[in-house]
Image (cartoon, rainbow, N blue to C red):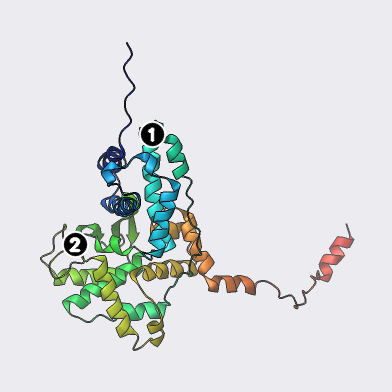
Amino acid sequence: MSKPPKAPPSFATLVQTYFAEYLVQQRALSSCTVAAYRDAFVLFLGFAESRLGKSPTAMAMADITPELIMAFLDHLERQRHNSVRSRNARLAALRAFLKFAAHRDVSSLQVIERALGVPVKRFERPMFGYLSREEMLAVIDTPDGTWTGQRDHVLFLLLYNTGARVSEITGVKVGEVVLDDGAACVHLHGKGRKQRSVPLWCSTVKAVRAWLRMNPQFDTASPLLPNRNGHAMTRNNAHQRLALAVKTATQTNPDLAKRRISPHTIRHTTAMHLLQAGVDISVIALWLGHESPTTTHHYVEADLTMKERALARLHEPEAKIQRYRAPDSLIDFLKTL
């Protein structure tokens, strides 16, 4: 006598398995990525509960329709005022779960296939904002000689030197900075647990050494850039300290007051300055920790100076192109052939 077919897992079981086993154990995603997926699901399930009148535990895969997903995405943009980029990120989290569920619940393949048909929303990418070298140096040199000022000086120098994401810099431990002459670098932990090492300027090494002399209590496991409580600076800490530095720098660079400057602006600044210095785009991609070179190519599109140099090599429509005239000796040579 054959065994009855195994009942497919419930929606609640699929969600729990997805987060507790698949993301953490099988894919070994970082805690930040798992948290982003979790937040997307909390928002979606809360919306679905109010829309369907069902608790999340009582939901089934059949409830996850394209109409529900589209209504949720519209809710994010209209009611929660999420950007298109954030909206697409939430959709990516849902799509990742649906692809996982397709392998675990074959009976729901048709439902899942329809749900996966919800498209990503296209949007115009804004032009990268970046600082001139003079503006960047003005911000870096703003902090004073106090403990907080010295820390902020190192923070801004490292952000500009490495072009790193703010979370990568605030997460650096003392032991991850190498200050040896000729081999100075910092080891960064990027997105998706990817690690990379970025070389340091002599000025950055000098500033870090001075900072460590000011803090002899640090050991190799200590955060390089702590707050007053000894914990690593947060993303908000870095944003606030940069805002204060920019406000002070506007006294000598008034145009900064018109700009919206964040730690990510410094990342763009590093990339643009490397590009303008003639560094190959593939090297810049490695420097920034870009997974896809396509991301780095956006900087090429944004560099007006490079485009102007290319334009200068072209003849304007009205310009009369000079016909090449060979020297007489060459003409004489050709006539002898």
What residue occupies the far front of the structure in this picture?
53
Residue at 48% over, 57% down: 121
x%, y% of residue 228? 14, 71
x%, y% of residue 187? 29, 57
In this view of the protein, can residue 194 be seen by the observer?
A: no
Q: Where is the N terminus found, in terms of image quarters? A: top left
Q: Is residue 125 above or below residue 312?
A: above
Left or right of 334, for residue 214: left
Neighbourhood count class around disc 1 (C-alpha, 10 Å): few under 14, some 14–19, many 20 upward: few
| Of the pair 153 and 50, the residue shown nearer to us | 50
| Of the pair 182 and 148, the residue shown nearer to us | 148
Residue at 20% over, 72% down: 210
Q: Secondary structure at mark 1?
A: helix
> What residue is disc 2 on?
223
Mark drawn on residue 95: none
| Of the pair 213 and 93, the residue shown nearer to us | 93
x%, y% of residue 12? 28, 40
Q: Disc 2 versus disc 1: distance between alpha carbons?
A: 42 Å
Residue 20's quadrant in the figure? top left
- Mark nearer the N terminus (2 vs 1): 1
| Of the pair 92 and 70, the residue shown nearer to us | 70
Q: Where is the C terminus found, in terms of image quarters? A: bottom right
Question: Amino acid under label 1?
Answer: His
Neighbourhood count class around disc 2 (C-alpha, 10 Å): few under 14, some 14–19, many 20 upward: many
What residue occupies the far left of the structure in this picture?
217
Question: Circles 2 and 1: CB distance less than 8 Å?
Answer: no
In this view of the protein, can residue 69 be seen by the observer?
A: yes
x%, y% of residue 157? 30, 71
> What residue is disc 1 on?
103
